[in-house]
Image: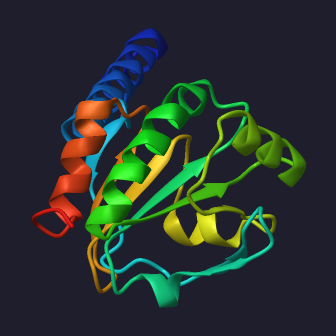
Amino acid sequence: MTRPRPALLITLIAGAAVLLLLGALGVGLMRGVGRPTEGRTDATLATAPQFRLTQFDGQTFDFAEQNKQPVFIYFWASWCVPCQAEAPIIESLWKEYRDRGVVFVGVNIWERPQDGREFAKQYRLSFPVVADETGSVYIEYGVQGLPTAFFVAAGGSVRTQFSGPLDEPTLRGLLDEIAPTGRS
């Protein structure tokens, strides 16, 4: 019986390793690994976690008191370029959708609250804006990037999660999905 040559053995092992790597890559691609995470996704949460945070104006925002109505929860930071572009759109739609019974709340994360306050003042945000200073809310919601929005139906069930920039038609469409029909 002849013994395999070392060069042949190394070639066989390297070939097997390449096949394993290609197989793992194929499985990952089939499962969506590496795809962009921006856009509308099925909600990772069935029910929106409750939270209670202080608004920039000093009042308390208690989600438990608000979730009898549909709620748009928007995670943002002042340094987030898409958040800067979206701020005027969100403010404009807030004025329209609050009359339809939709609650808006902006949750400022990953920065000093003072920077968030300056941003809210600069963009004249009139909807409730809170600071998640401890990071507990964004962790409970599973936020991995900014901006991230959650569209919550009356009663607290999360209908949609959206990661990345929202343009006005997309935001309007997602708000329409949770808003009560008709206008006040």
Residue displayed at 82% across by 40% down: 118
x, y percent for residue 182 = 10, 64
Q: Which of 128 and 144 is in front in this view?
A: 128
Q: Image height check: is 70 above or below 90?
A: below
Residue 115 location in percent, x, y? 84, 42
Relative to 184, is 158 on the left or the right? right
Q: Which residue is drawn at 23% across and 33% down?
A: 169
Position in image of residue 66 (x %, y %):
46, 82
What x and y, as percent, mark residue 13?
Answer: 40, 25
Seen from the viewer's position, the closer of residues 107 and 57 is 57
With 182 as the anchor, is 29 left or right in this view? right
Is 156 situated left or right of 73 in this image?
left
**Residue 69, image quadrant:** bottom left
As rendered, which of 62 and 133 lies closer to the eye? 62
| Image quadrant occupied by the N terminus | top left
Identify the residue shown where x is 74% and y is 77%: 59
Q: Which residue lies furthest to the top in this view?
A: 7
